[in-house]
Amino acid sequence: MKILNLIEGYSSHIYTSNVYLITGDFNSIPDVNTLIDAGRDPSIIMKIKNASTGVGKKRIEQLILTHSHYDHVGMLSEIKREFNPTVMAFSNSIDGIDVLLRDGEVIKAGDSSLEVIYMPGHSNDSILLYDKKNQILFAGDSPLIIKSTGNSYEDEFIRVFERVCSLKIKIIYFGHGDPLNRGVEAVLKKSFSMLKK
């Protein structure tokens, strides 16, 4: 699996989420070119057109939204018009959703697969996407690094967080900022301990 953050290294004046393009290692025909979130920055259209996505393949076959906040969905209609991907989300609270996802569902992405994990907390339609084979988690804006006990969290959020702590994770890709690729399990366990205080 190859992961390209289409926002990385670009100084934009537009407030946007990260937008991840997932392809297979060799861009073979069975690989499913996948976009995670749509962001708000129009520059991603040209970045998708210039990306190495495989000969004879759709540049974007599917777009998975981690949740429906404006900074993650702003370019949805433009991406849909330009590339016509199947758009997937946990709710149809915005226009343009083709497929509603379910907790526990597994979706092919690139040359791997992603498990949908429903995690209410940041929004009522937030999901995580877990690649078991590569031990990667796409977190959207779900709060996974918790440094204080000042906030209160719903029981369901705490239950899902506990489950996340049991997964083997080497890298977390967030909706904003850089990925976490060191001491992931220790960070998650420390955050979980903050939830229980």
Image: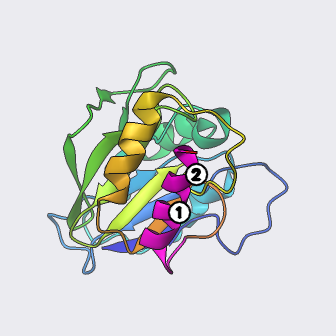
At x 21%, y 65%, the residue is 112
Q: Which residue is mark 1?
A: 190
Three-letter code for the amino acid on which mark 2 is drawn: Met
Q: Position of residue 81 (x, y in %)?
A: 49, 37
Q: In what quadrant of the picture does the C terminus appear?
A: top right
Q: Residue shown at 53%/33% (left/top)?
A: 121
Q: Give yes or no for contact between labels 1 and 2 (Cβ–Cβ under 8 Å).
A: yes
Quadrant position of the N terminus in the picture = bottom left
For numbered disc 1, what is the local secondary structure?
helix
Q: What separation in Å lies between label 1 and label 2 (alpha carbons)?
A: 7 Å
- 16 vs 96, left or right, is right
Residue 191 counted in the magenta span: yes
- In the picture, measured across the screen, residue 91 lies left or right of residue 190, that is left
Q: Circle 2: is it few (<14), some (14-19), or many (20+) Cα within 10 Å?
A: some
Q: Say whether residue 19 is left or right of residue 8.
A: left
The residue that label 2 is drawn on is 194
The numbered disc on residue 159 is none
